[in-house]
Amino acid sequence: MALHLIYFFQSSQNQNESWTPARYKVVHFFGDNGFISDEQMREIAKSDPHADLTDLTFLSLDDLKSFAARVSEEVGGENVRLLSVQDYNIGLDGARDLKELREIFVKFGETMEISSPQKKKGLFGKFFT
């Protein structure tokens, strides 16, 4: 099952003498069976000490990718396609039909393959691999 994650990048800001670091916010996370619940995502995000659980934000793209991989492993996904809101909007403007809309993640996104632990091979599996 392929999963899709749309995220919003907000750069660091200096407003009213308070500094806000750059962050990556999960906007939508879904697969073939629908959206992944916020409760499930918050539970998985607890393992990242820098994650903001109230609005599911991460301090780096690597933290976001690590989170996406953990969610994928939890729900049995084979890969995760990450796409920023900005790239999604660019692809959306050019999409003329449903097929092109689905291709936005392939054309503009980044695909992460999730490696699942290898099953132990049986006697015949050892001979034929």
Image: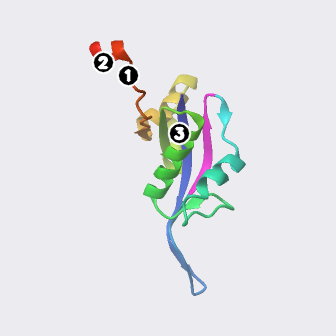
Q: Which residues are magenta?
A: 25-32
Where residue 89 appears, as percent x and y from the top left, is 54, 44
Image x and y of residue 95, in percent: 52, 31
Amino acid type shown at disc 3: Glu
Disc 2 designates what residue? Answer: 126
The quadrant in which residue 18 appears is: bottom right
Picture residue at 56% right of the left edge, 44% below the top:
71
How far apart, in angstroms, are the residues tagged by discs 3 and 2? 26 Å
The amino acid at mark 2 is: Lys
Disc 1 secondary structure class: loop
Residue holding disc 3: 73
- The secondary element bearing badge 3 is classed as helix
For the residues carrying marks 3 and 2, which lies nearer the camera in this image?
Answer: 2
- Does the CB distance between marks 2 and 1 fall below 8 Å? yes
Q: Which mark is residue 121?
A: 1
Residue found 61% across the figure and 43% down from its top: 29
Residue 26 is one of the magenta-drawn residues: yes
